[in-house]
Image (spheres, helix red, strand yellow):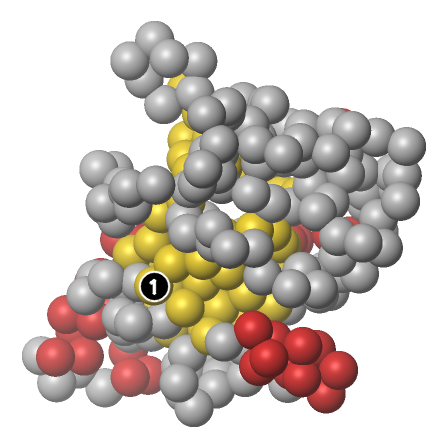
Amino acid sequence: MANHRRIHAAHPSRRAFLGAAGAALTLAGTPLSAIPVLQRTPRQSLGPFYPASLPLDSDSDLVQVEGKAGRASGIVTHITGRVMDERGRVMPAALVEIWQCNAFGRYHHPRDRRDAPIDENFQGYGRTTTGDGGGYRFRTIRPVPYPGRTPHIHFAVHVPGADPLITQMYVDGEPGNARDGLLNSVRDPRARESLIVNLHPAGGGTGELAGEFDLVLAADGRSARAEPRLLEALRRSV
């Protein structure tokens, strides 16, 4: 399957704008203490369904699987964003992974034995590398509820010399957000809001959606320390 070009969103978010401004000030010699600090992306649970083995097709398009003519069930959704630190400095060549359940609420994982269909046309997992401007892009489906969970997409970000950032992206307006224990474990409202993304029509009358999710690490390039089991699982995948 042909790889999709990675492009940056035409209308960057306020966080992205502040990040670019901060980077410019740094280059101009402005002290770091005078640069606006972005909201660091909170760390979330890895969850039980990180792939036991990576699919043969593990590119950034989860909607079509190489060798299959069909398209995944669900609403096609384009997720874009940038990987940067809290001072706004972008991080090129970062590895970004995502995984999520299919449109029927089932993961591609041997431990998910729910009585729900398996969608052979949904990749379930994807990865890409950020470009020079720190941007990434995925083509996937709008996440759906999973028993006990509000709709979400799992993310992992790998930056050389740092612990991976493990987090989850949520959808603005979902009624389950108010009851989701993991989302609401983030007590700081501003930090919690940084995990919630507005999905809007992508345009062109296709019925597809689009949203922007920036991933912000600490200024020294690290994320919050991750537990050893999580680190071991992720390092095996890289």
Other-residue count near label 1 (Cα within 10 Å), few / some / many at <14 / 14–19 / ≥20: many
The residue to which callout 1 is attached is: 129
Q: Is residue 116 visible?
A: yes
Q: Position of residue 234 (x, y in %)?
A: 61, 75
In which quadrant will I find the N terminus? top left
**Residue farthest toward the left in the current orientation of the protein:** 28
Give left or right: position of 235 versus 207. right
Query: Toward the viewer: 134 or 29?
Result: 134
The residue type indicated by label 1 comes to Thr
Q: Is residue 136 above or below residue 144?
A: below
Q: Residue 161 falls in which quadrant of the image?
A: bottom left
Give left or right: position of 220 versus 62. left
**Residue farthest toward the bottom in the current orientation of the protein:** 161
Q: Position of residue 141 (x, y in %)?
A: 54, 32
Q: Position of residue 165 (x, y in %)?
A: 55, 72
Q: Name the residue at 60% across, 45% down.
A: 124
Give left or right: position of 13 versus 176. left
Q: Position of residue 107 (x, y in %)?
A: 73, 45
Q: Residue 84 falls in which quadrant of the image?
A: bottom left
